[in-house]
Amino acid sequence: MAELQFVGMVFESVIIVIAFIFLVMILMRYYEKKHQLTFYLFVIFLFYIIAIIFSWLSKILVLYSGIDYVYNSVIPDPNTPISWVLLRITDFRLSFVFLTIAIYLSYILKVNIFEKGYNKGERIIVIIYFLFTALFSLIIYQRGNTLIDAFAFLFVFIFMAMIYFPFFVRSYQSFKSTGDKVFKKAFLSLALMSIFYILVPLNFLIDRILILLGGVGFSPFYFLAWIFVILGIIGAYFGYIRPKSKQ
C-alpha cells in the first residue's frame, strides 16, 4: 500500500506542476486585460489546485508523518483539533471542500458568460446544495468507513454534473450556432472542459466503489480523475483565454 501511496504522490506532484503553469498563464492574462471573468477563472483553478495539493499532502502524511492514526484506520479517532484536521486531510475531505468551492465558482462563471442574470430559484438550489456538500464532507465522517466516503464522492459528482452539464449544453449550442472559427474552437474547448470536469468525481467515485468491493484503492480510475482535471484546465484555457480573446 505504501508503494501505491508513493506512486500517487509522485503522480499528483506532476499534476500540480502542470496545473500551476496554466494558473500562472491565466494570472498573466488577467494582469494584461483586467477582466473580471478572467479573475473568476483564475480563482476557480486556484481552488482546484489547492484541492490537489491537499490530496498530495494526504500521501505525505501517510508516508512520512509517523502518526499512527493517520495511516492506521483501525485506531479510533483522537479527539483533538489537530487530529480532526489531519484525518480530514488524509481522507480527502478538505480536498472535497475546495473542489466544491471551485464548482460553485464555476456556476458564477457560467452565469456571467451565458446568462443575462441569475435565476433566483436555481441560485437558491445551487447555494443549498453547495453548503450541504461542503458540510457533509467536513462533518459526516467516520475513520475507515468507506461507504460514507463513497457518499461524499457521490455528492461532489452530483454537484459537478449539476453545474457543468448545463455549461456543456450552452457551450455546445454556441459552438453549433457561431460561424466564427476562433469562437467555434473556443466553445468546443469549453464543452470538452465541462465533460472532463464531470468525469473527475465520477472516476473518484468508481475508485471508491472498487474499494468497497474489496480493492486496495489507487485503481486506474483514481489516476484518470486527476488527468481529467488537467484536461479540463487545458480546455478552459483554450476556450476562454484564447489568442484573439479580449478577456
Image: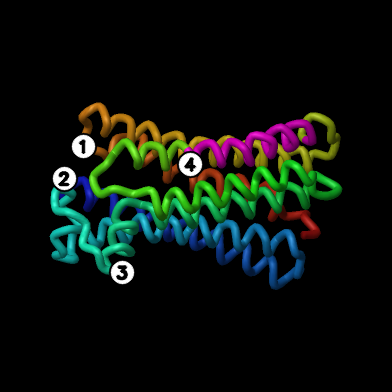
Q: Earlier in the sequence, mark 4 or mark 3?
A: 3
The label shown at residue 1 is 2
Mark 1 vs mark 3: in front: 3
The residue to which callout 1 is attached is 216
The residue to which callout 4 is attached is 228
User: Residue 180's quadrant in the figure?
Assistant: top right
Q: Earlier in the sequence, mark 1 or mark 2?
A: 2
Q: Earlier in the sequence, mark 4 or mark 2?
A: 2
Q: Earlier in the sequence, mark 1 or mark 3?
A: 3
From the viewer's perspective, tell me whether residue 232 is left or right of residue 58: right
Foreground residue, 58 or 124? Answer: 124
Marks 4 and 2, how far apart in space? Answer: 24 Å
Q: Are marks 1 and 2 in contact (CB under 8 Å)?
A: yes
Marks 1 and 2, how far apart in space? Answer: 8 Å
User: Residue 119's quadrant in the figure?
Assistant: top right
Check disc 4 and give the amino acid type. Answer: Phe
Circle 4: element type: helix
